[in-house]
């Protein structure tokens, strides 16, 4: 994957006799059969000084080896100055279509008159994915993500990949189409899990069960539907590969849902141990293939 720093995890290379016959995308990219390869990724660069500091510490200490930048946000110049001093850093674009904070907002780079479906009453982007889903037109999505790419190019940022802030570009097939089109057109890899997605499927199922239990609606043995986004994952992955772009076999983004009991009273040492243990346990469950591990930047500094 273009300029990506990929860490091959020595978690065991043996494969049992029932291993899948189809080569993983990691194997297609040149890694040995059965290798578990991960990209340790922290996003939200450029969002704020604290977000930048989290990226600086995570990548500088070797905890993460990949990041992505929120181009509409005001702290992008600070991150660009850091990137100039670390030109080999894997830095993509965290394509941004939401502005989720109450008292800290940003608007679309394409201009609110050009993308009215992306703008709320404050003149900023909407706070949540649902509002974008119901208000934005696909052509507005296209204009805005291209404007974000154009700003990066104007600042002499050469993005190594594209991914999606809050997953907004995965909310609707028409949005996803614009995201994939931009990647293919510019020949820049897009974050997309198009393989077996065994970890992603298992984590999504566990999260659904947890929510059903919270609502008192879960019964043992009930059918748990898979995320709709996985329905055509392999088909899209195959299409990306045929168009010259690398593809992920799996996606690990469950750390955003981790909730440490009693976190408000925890010491730094306790936070470090809790998050470290969780990352070690979850990474140990990854299957052979190329997996992006999206790490919560607030927790990375404690690992």
Image (cartoon, rainbow, N blue to C red):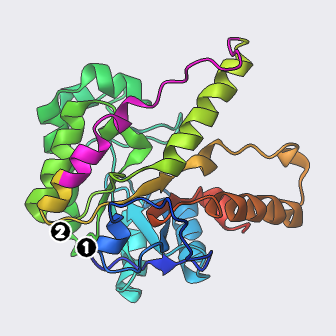
Residue 150 can be seen, yes or no = no
Reply above or below: 169 against 56: above
Residue farthest top in this picture: 217
Q: Is residue 116 left or right of residue 12?
A: left
The quarter of the rendered structure image containing the N terminus is bottom left
- Quarter-wise, where is residue 298 in the image? bottom right
> Given contact means CB atoms under 8 Å apart, are the residues at marks 2 and 1 in contact?
yes
Q: How packed is label 1: few (under 14 Cα within 10 Å), some, or many (20 or more)?
A: some
Image point (54%, 77%), residue name: 59
SS of the residue at dot 1? loop
Highlighted range, magenta? 217-238
Task: Identify which residue, 37 or 154, lies in the foreground.
Answer: 37
| Magenta stretch: includes residue 220 | yes
At which x and y percent is residue 235? Answer: 22, 44
Q: Which residue is mark 2?
A: 153
Image coordinates of residue 77 in percent, x first then y, are 36, 69
Which quadrant would residue 113 be assigned to in this image?
Answer: top left
- Is residue 32 visible from the viewing direction of this image? yes
Image quadrant in which you'd find residue 25: bottom left
Dot 2 lies on which element? helix
Q: Is residue 263 left or right of residue 82?
A: right
Q: Residue at x 39, y 24 (%)?
A: 130
Rendered position, 235 above or below 162: above
Q: In the picture provided, is 260 more to the left or to the right than 208?
A: right
Task: Give the CA separation, mark 2 to mark 1.
Answer: 5 Å
Which residue is under mark 1? 157
Relative to 183, 34 lies left or right: right
Q: Residues within 10 Å of mark 2 (few under 14, many from 20)?
A: few
């Amino acid at each position: 994957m273009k300029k990506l720093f990929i860490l091959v995890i020595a978690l065991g290379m043996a494969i049992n006799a029932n291993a899948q016959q189809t080569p993983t995308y990691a194997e297609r990219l040149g890694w040995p059969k059965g290798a578990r390869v991960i990209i340790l990724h922290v996003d939200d660069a450029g969002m704020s000084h604290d977000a930048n500091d989290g990226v600086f510490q995570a990548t500088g200490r070797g905890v993460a080896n990949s990041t992505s930048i929120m181009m509409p946000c005001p702290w992008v110049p600070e991150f660009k100055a850091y990137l100039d001093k670390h030109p080999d850093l894997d830095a993509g674009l965290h394509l941004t279509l939401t502005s989720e904070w109450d008292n800290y907002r940003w608007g679309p780079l394409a201009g609110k008159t050009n993308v009215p479906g992306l703008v709320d009453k404050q003149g900023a982007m909407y706070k949540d994915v649902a509002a974008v889903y119901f208000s934005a037109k696909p052509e507005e999505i296209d204009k805005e993500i291209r404007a974000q790419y154009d700003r990066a190019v104007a600042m002499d940022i050469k993005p190594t990949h594209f991914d999606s802030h809050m997953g907004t570009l995965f909310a609707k097939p028409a949005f996803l189409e614009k995201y994939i089109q931009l990647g293919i057109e510019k020949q820049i890899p897009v974050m997309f899990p198009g393989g077996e997605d065994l970890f992603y499927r298992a984590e999504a199922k566990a999260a659904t069960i947890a929510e059903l239990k919270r609502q008192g609606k879960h019964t043992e043995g009930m059918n748990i539907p898979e995320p709709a986004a996985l329905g055509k994952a392999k088909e899209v992955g195959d299409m990306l590969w045929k168009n010259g772009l690398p593809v992920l076999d799996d996606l690990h983004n469950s750390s955003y849902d981790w909730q440490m009991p009693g976190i408000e009273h925890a010491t730094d040492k306790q936070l470090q141990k809790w998050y470290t243990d969780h990352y070690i346990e979850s990474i140990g469950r990854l299957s052979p293939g190329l997996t992006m591990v999206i790490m919560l930047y607030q927790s990375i500094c404690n690992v």
